[in-house]
Image (cartoon, helix red, strand yellow):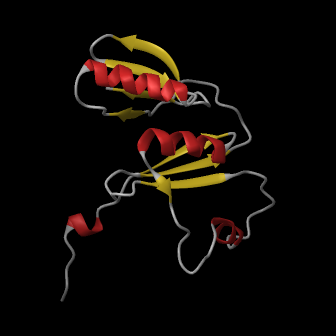
Amino acid sequence: MVTASFHDMAPRISLTLDTTHASELAEFWKFALGYVDEPPPAPFKTRQEWVASFDLPDDDGDGAWLIDPDGVGPRLSLLDVPEPKTAKNRLHVDLKVGGSWAHVTAEAERLTGAGASVLRVDQGHHIVMADPEGNEFCLC
């Protein structure tokens, strides 16, 4: 009898962001995290082919699926939804920059150049930011 350890069966975290322009926002998060597009699951050759296999009602929404090329970070799905963002996120991502406060502020400048905005600076501790669609995250 073969038994699997809890670690072998433990769920993995995958984060999903509701978006209005998934493909565009995916470019920001690939830039911010160093992620790459996740290949479609076998036997599909494209993501569009995979999505079409679900026989969903007509959906004009876009989607993007990103992964950490080193296999360490969680998968990130970005899915277009019809309704706009209306309130603060209940869950947000913390990007651990590491190093000195200068590293954190340099990363904030880099991401601001890619379309993010600074919402609040807690000097010496973290910077609250928003991606181009307003989803909050922190740099620390």
**Residue displayed at 60% across by 41% down:** 25
Residue lying furthest right: 58
* Lateral position of residue 140 relative to residue 115, left or right: left
* Lateral position of residue 21 relative to residue 137, left or right: right
Quadrant of residue 81 within the rendered picture: top right
* Lateral position of residue 59 relative to residue 89, left or right: right
**Residue displayed at 39% across by 19% down:** 127
Instruction: Give the percent coordinates (x, y) of residue 19.
Output: 64, 40
Q: Nearer the viewer, residue 128 or 30?
A: 30
Above or below 37: residue 27: above
**Residue displayed at 55% across by 31% down:** 114
Q: Nearer the viewer, residue 101 or 120?
A: 101
Instruction: Give the percent coordinates (x, y) of residue 99.
Output: 22, 28
Q: Which of 132 and 91 is in front in this view?
A: 132
Above or below 43: residue 18: above
* Lateral position of residue 120 relative to residue 6, left or right: right
Q: Quadrant of the C terminus?
A: top left
Above or below 140: residue 120: above
Q: Quadrant of the N terminus?
A: bottom left
Instruction: Give the percent coordinates (x, y) of residue 79.
Output: 62, 49
Quadrant of residue 120 within the rendered picture: top left
